[in-house]
């Protein structure tokens, strides 16, 4: 379907991830997934008890931490909704952080940061980078999004170690499969609307089943970006490990209508004492982008 783009030189640090139980569906037990998006207005004592039961499973050390990629920016805003009016299929993410060194107990106040491209493959802060194939210019999507901040944000974990984001399904760029970048931070504080201080415990990427991605990319506005989409098996970062490698559990809002959106979930098991800064800082102006960057021409093809 696409040319292979696997790059075995990508650095993989050992990180700790939770399998989610004896029967695993994308990092959650079958029973646990049914309540993954339940109302979280219960008391802290009740919530903690429920989470402890759900996460009292075997933690395994897995090679799941990967490069942060070329398009990381400091100073993302602490907010639940990161769309800023960007068009796309709605995606609600429920991400859980547990301490794999302490019986998979929740990590309250962990800061989870995500960022990803828009429906046509553009990242905020780097909107002149060509996503490959043929796509409209980023400015043609008609949104009122801030070109420096859209589809980026933090959330601070509650007593369950849970954060929730409202975003859109990401598009794609050459030579990558669809993905969402993620960092888990601890020890910092919210300050002036951003998260300051602390350390990064985990750097990773979240991935989507090929069949779901194919259905999404046939819809507007994704379909305006044409070209060769890289499937999971050919991606340079995803290593085929399923949930332990970042493959999301996804549930459609309406089974027969992919445009209605999806709910995605996964659990991160971390060592709060460990530090993992990630790699792949953005290139300097005029520099050569890292191997997972979009083409760096001045603008997308029309």
Image (cartoon, grey):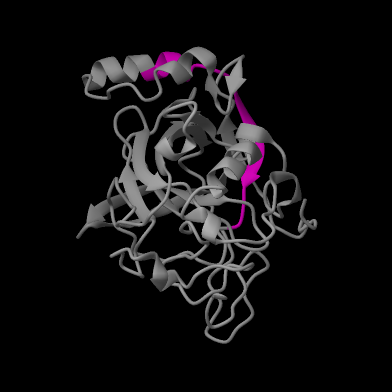
The residue sitting at 33% across, 34% down in the picture is 108
- Provide residue 239's location: percent of width, then percent of height: 72, 44
- Provide residue 69's location: percent of width, then percent of height: 57, 62
Does the magenta run of residues contain 54?
yes
For this rendering, which residue is in front, 231 or 185? 231
Q: Which residue range is magenta in the image?
A: 51-67
The residue sitting at 40% across, 70% down in the picture is 140
Does the magenta run of residues contain 268?
no
* Number of numbered discs on residues: 0
Is any part of residue 171 visible from this angle? no
Q: Taking 88 as reference, is 29 left or right?
A: right
- Provide residue 184's location: percent of width, then percent of height: 44, 46
Residue 48: image quadrant is top left
Q: Is residue 167 above or below residue 152?
A: above
For this rendering, which residue is in front, 199 or 243? 243
Is any part of residue 144 visible from this angle? yes
- Most extreme residue toward the bottom is 286
Q: Quadrant of the C terminus?
A: bottom right
The residue sitting at 43% across, 51% down in the picture is 114
- Provide residue 222's location: percent of width, then percent of height: 51, 54
The residue sitting at 50% across, 70% down in the picture is 136
């Amino acid at each position: 379907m696409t040319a292979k783009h696997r790059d075995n030189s990508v650095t993989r640090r050992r990180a700790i991830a939770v399998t989610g139980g004896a029967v695993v569906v994308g990092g959650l037990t079958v029973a646990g997934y049914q309540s993954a998006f339940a109302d979280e207005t219960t008391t802290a004592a009740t919530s903690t008890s429920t989470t402890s039961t759900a996460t009292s499973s075997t933690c395994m050390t897995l090679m799941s931490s990967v490069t942060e990629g070329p398009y990381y920016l400091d100073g993302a805003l602490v907010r639940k909704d990161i769309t800023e009016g960007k068009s796309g299929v709605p995606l609600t993410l429920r991400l859980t952080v547990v301490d794999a060194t302490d019986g998979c107990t929740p990590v309250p106040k962990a800061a989870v940061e995500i960022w990803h491209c828009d429906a046509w493959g553009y990242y905020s802060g780097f909107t002149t980078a060509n996503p490959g194939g043929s796509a409209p210019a980023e400015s043609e999507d008609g949104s009122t999004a801030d070109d420096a901040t859209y589809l980026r944000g933090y959330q601070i974990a509650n007593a369950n170690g849970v954060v929730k984001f409202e975003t859109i399904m990401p598009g794609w760029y050459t030579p990558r499969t669809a993905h969402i970048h993620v960092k888990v931070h601890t020890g910092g504080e919210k300050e002036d609307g951003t998260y300051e201080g602390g350390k990064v415990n985990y750097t990773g990427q979240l991935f989507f089943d090929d069949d779901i991605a194919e259905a999404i990319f046939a819809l507007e506005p994704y379909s305006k970006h044409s070209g060769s989409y890289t499937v999971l098996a050919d991606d340079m970062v995803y290593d085929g490990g399923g949930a332990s490698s970042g493959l999301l559990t996804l549930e459609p809002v309406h089974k027969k209508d992919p445009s209605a959106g999806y709910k995605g979930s996964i659990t991160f098991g971390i060592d709060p004492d460990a530090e993992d800064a990630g790699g792949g800082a953005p290139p300097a102006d005029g520099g050569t982008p890292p191997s997972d960057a979009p083409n760096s021409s001045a603008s997308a093809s029309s």
